[in-house]
Amino acid sequence: MRHFSSMFNGLARSFSMRRGKNSSNGDGREAAETMAKDAKKHDMILRSSGFVNVDGSNNLASVCSKRGRKGVNQDCAIVWEGFGGQADMLFCGIFDGHGPWGHFVAKKVRESMPSSLLCNWQETLAQTSLDPDLESDKKHQRFHIWKHSYLKTCAAVDHELEQYRKIDSFYSGTTALTIVRQGDIIYVANVGDSRAVLATNSDDGNLVPVQLTVDFKPNLPRE
């Protein structure tokens, strides 16, 4: 496992990003957090073992977490149906803490990341013109919008964690695996060794698992 503070650096190695002017997004973050509270009130957010199935939706999401033998359960998860008020969007996140404060870090990241990502996505979307002629170009542009939003989010959440002086991020941290499904497209961001697996149908009708992420471990040469 790798601590969360490496998330921004890890994603930055994978993506190139233009530097733009810094803008205050305090109002946007507040609006995103208000939206999250409203979604929770209407049972559209799941943060503990159980399932969520919003009326009128074809989606069914479930979460299960069980304490092991090591002591405190440091696993956190979240499912947000209708992410950002968009009927065709879904946010999922898994955060596996480690170290003395791993449970605290995982919980803080779970609480902060969705709203921060939503805020940055809306801000980036407002600054971008989606008018390419080809559909393939539109998909490529949408990918870069999410990529840019994730980079900003990781930096913001990392900064928030630095405010907690009790936490030694060298010994305590969390993995962070998140997925945004927008229509029939999914965007995956991952750091650490939590794993995303997609179940698909084979030609003969059987379910086939497809691993979507790479387990980042210290013994990987590229790590």
Image (spheres, helix red, strand yellow):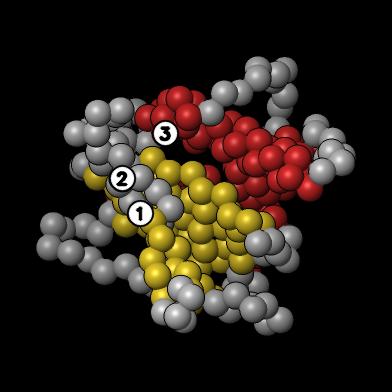
Which mark is in front, 1 or 3?
Answer: 1
Q: Can residue 80 be seen from the camera position used here?
A: yes
On screen, residue 178 above or below 88: above
Left or right for 84, reference 78: right
Label pair 1/2, CB-CB below 8 angstroms: yes
Q: Mark 3 points at which residue?
A: 7
* Residue type, mark 1 in image: Arg
Give the SS element for disc 2: loop
**Residue 73's x, y, as percent?**
25, 59
Taking the spot 80% from the left edge, 32% from the top edge, the residue there is: 127
On screen, residue 173 above or below 195: above
**Residue 151's x, y, as percent?**
55, 32
Left or right for 196, reference 141: left
Q: Mark 1 points at which residue?
A: 195
Give the SS element for disc 3: helix
Which mark is in front, 3 or 2?
Answer: 2
Q: Mark 2 points at which residue?
A: 215
- Along the line of sight, the residue nearer the viewer: 2 or 42: 2
Real-space Cα separation, disc 3 to disc 2, in angstroms: 13 Å
Taking the spot 63% from the left edge, 56% from the top edge, the residue there is: 185
First in sequence: mark 1 or mark 3?
Answer: 3
First in sequence: mark 3 or mark 2?
Answer: 3
